[in-house]
Amino acid sequence: MTTTSVNQDKPLPGKPSVAPAFRWAILTLSLSMLLPALSTSIVNVALPSLAEGFSASFQQVQWIVLAYLLAISILIVGVGRLGDIAGRRRLLLAGIAVFTAATFLSGVAPTLWLLIAARAAQGLGAASMMALSMAFVAETVPPSRIGRAMGLLGTMSAVGTALGPSLGGVLIAGFGWRAIFFVTAPLGLLTFVLARRYLPADGPTQKVGRLGFDYVGMLLLALTLGAYLLAVTLEHGVFGTLSLVLMLAAVVGLGLFVLVERRVTSPLVRLANFREPVLSAGLAMSALVSTVMMTTLVVGPFHLSRALGIQTALIGLVMSAGPVVAALTGVPAGRMVDRLGAQRVVFVGLIGMVVGSISMSLVPVSFGIAGYVTSLVVITASYALFQTANNTTVMTGIRADQRGVISGMLNLSRNLGLLTGASVMGAVFAFASGATDITTAASEDVATGTRWAFAVAATLITVALGVAIGSRNRLSADRDE
């Protein structure tokens, strides 16, 4: 395989043949972000059919979704770092291949537990695709267009999330649940062919130090994240004995991970990176903001059905307004980042999310669907602005040998926020409503729960704003010195 330099893959004046290759590379990275998101949302809608098809309980079929999300969250930092060491193109191709093969195996799985195992393997491939697609942006996109590229990747992720429920519903109604995997597998094969053809070859510096991968650190991080994620998901925010034991195990695992990373020659995560205000602030804000976004997904269906009395068929349509707005906002958000600067757009996005969360907390039930959707649009559009700007800020200026692991950490912070939000914000909503069973709670109680949940959400975004201000002040102080 010949080595291709980064600059050769950028569009250059007087070389029109390069521009099409550049566009095909961006399309490839976009598909690598779309498919993992699509594979999350398209399966959610199939859970009732899967429970019926395998004669399983809802708690059992939930593992079809949970295994996929756990695999992504546990492995994404490790595969990002391995891409930095062994070559990003090589590992991305392997990840796409694993994702595609596991998708096909999911479609033909004869038993529930084989399907769950195939979904875990699919999550491994998805982790590689998500982490390395963002890392590739710096190698395939000119600096003046990085914001737009990040916005496009965010758009494709939102499109996958929005498309999943409707596409899955049509496929399941017409062909059964196996069709949702048989449709996704050819897209994975197409992505593999495009990646092999158009992504730049691994440079020589990426092939050095292959034996320096931190396997002990990877194992400790995987066990720590696994314990934490199971703690916040298994008991749905109740935090009983099992959750507390798992949380304690996560704390111990984190301590051991830090000790190991301080001593090894080639750590999985360089702890010194967290001294950089841009990175530490970006990861913290990403987790906080994602927690708030999950509030809209957890609280929304109950508020629409119980507080507003909307029919089930209409709830999905109303809920899809969020992903649709995110998809439409991603590319314009990227243009704003390129023109105004990422730091300014971060603040605009966070302020917009505070306004939207406060609006959701205060809007009267009498405003109906219009009041809910208006607040949801403000939150989601502002989230798209923040996400594009924050990803651009963190990934710009990162050393080439750290892009994969930093991209993995960004994706991990988002996933941790989403999974934590599903548990914790769901618990806040249920507690504030005062109902023993939220599915049968009175409309007034559900409305009260919604107000308190989004009041907490507004507080979390205010904390994120404080983190952003603190990061800016630290950067200014460093420049003055």
Image (cartoon, rainbow, N blue to C red):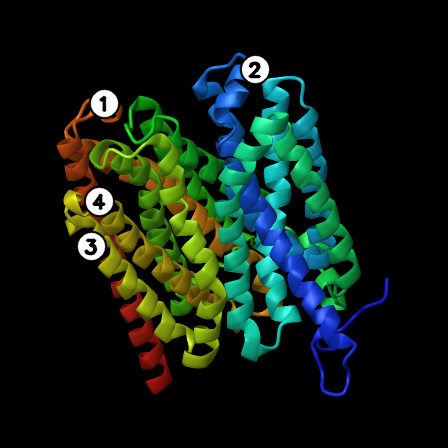
Labels 3, 4: front one: 4
The amino acid type, in three-letter code, at marker 3 is Ser
Labels 4, 2: front one: 4
Question: How far, Cα to Cα, is label 4 from label 2?
Answer: 39 Å
Mark 2 secondary-structure assignment: loop
Residue lying at 31% horizontally and 49% vertically, measured from the top left: 292
- The residue that mark 3 highlights is 359
Labels 1, 4: front one: 4
Residue 69 located left or right of residue 315: right
Residue lying at 44% horizontally and 39% vertically, measured from the top left: 253
Percent position (x, y) of residue 143? 57, 77
Of labels 3 and 4, earlier in sequence is 3
Q: Give the camera-side residue of 130 and 27.
A: 27
- The residue that mark 1 highlights is 440
Question: How far, Cα to Cα, is label 1 from label 4?
Answer: 20 Å
Give the number of the disc on residue 185.
none
Question: How far, Cα to Cα, is label 3 from label 1?
Answer: 26 Å
